[in-house]
Amino acid sequence: MELASIAQLKEMAGDSPMYADVDVQLQSRQSKMTRTNKPYLELGFADSTGNFSLKLWEDRPLFSVAQGWPDGVMIRVSGKWTQNQYGLDGNDLSARVLNQQERELFLTGDPDLQAKQQIDWQTITSLCSSIHDPRLQRLTARFFDKFGEMFRRTAAARRNHHARRGGLVEHVAQMMRSADALCHVYADWNRDLLLVGVLFHDCGKLWENSYPRDGFAQIHSLRGEMLGHIPIGIECVNKLWSDMIEEEATTDWLILEPRSEDVRLHLLHLIASHHGQYEFGSPTLPRTPEAFALHFIDNIDAKMEMLKDAYRNANEIAPQIYEKVFPLPANLVTPLSSFFVAEADFEITEQDADEVENDQNQTNGENE
């Protein structure tokens, strides 16, 4: 069988079964019952490219085997794979634990994704180095020094978008590119504040959606479950800020405008309001141009990632129409391609020009 990553499996699987092996790490396991009291297991699997859940029914041979897997085990699952609007499904499944050599190769991750995330990391650090406000630039440096490694292995979400190891770096980098571009359009925005707000808006997810150094199964922490990433993010930035002021503040900072306390307060407001609505978890609503900008940039990038995944993974139910994929609101339609005319279409020879001129002269003569 062909060995595929989770991302490749989602891209290739459709209505017709495809045979493939996939190396995964067990992320979660729950014993459940149907309404008719039929037992089944719901397993969560992950690799460097993404994750998926799989139901195993009691009458399947793999059911009893999966019950004995230790947490975080790395396995190779083989079988026939299909995909519908609810995700991947497998039949005739078998599985075995990876050997040491296979585990080492599995943990290196997908090389193309690693290369992309390295470029995204360079984008983040480069844009942060362009910040003019010395307090905000120093704050980002302290964050990278203390949490940079953890940041680089954190997901942007548990599902829906950038739900993979390093996904937060991808999400933040793209948001920073958008914010930087829009600051050239809306010149009255505080670019320094907005860029740093993008960096920190989801920093609480380091304690909500992070990964261990040696695996792809997201860590569940009591802190993340009980507080959520917005309060944790506010707490994190407040601590970094207060330590910076205590240890590094200079007399020059006392005369800077805007005042340090105002900068801190506006930055915390960006973190607190970035979900945009109370019902989506924001303790306050956006109240500044930068807060509105951050909310919409965040939403746009999340939606574009969902669309990209949906077009790649969804089944085509009619020509140019794809089945609805949660959490998008409707069936998708193939995007309109960009206008393009081959360069050769513009090449007009001297003979063509003479013929056009003769035709025009003849037409003018007939009109006279």
Image (cartoon, rainbow, N blue to C red):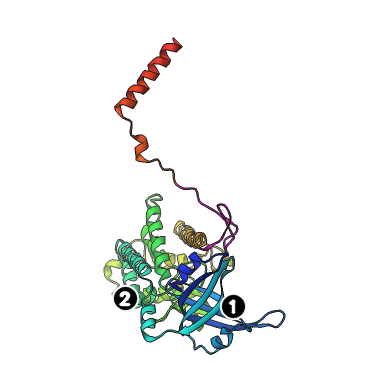
In the drawing, does residue 99 fall left or right of residue 322? left
Q: Which residues are magenta?
A: 313-337
The type of residue carrying mark 1 is Lys
Q: What residue do we see at 40% from left, 86% from top? A: 99
The type of residue carrying mark 2 is Asp
Residue 266: x and y in percent read 43, 64
Residue 315 is a magenta residue? yes
Q: What residue do we see at 50% from left, 67% from top? A: 10
Residue 218 is a magenta residue? no
In the drawing, does residue 276 fall left or right of residue 247? right
In the drawing, does residue 267 fall left or right of residue 54? left
Q: Is residue 213 visible?
A: no
Above or below: residue 76 compared with residue 256: below
The residue that label 1 is drawn on is 55
Quadrant, the C terminus: top left
The residue that label 2 is drawn on is 145
Q: Earlier in the sequence, mark 2 or mark 1?
A: 1
Above or below: residue 356 compared with residue 297: above
Q: Secondary structure at mark 1?
A: strand
Q: Nearer the viewer, residue 146 or 211?
A: 211
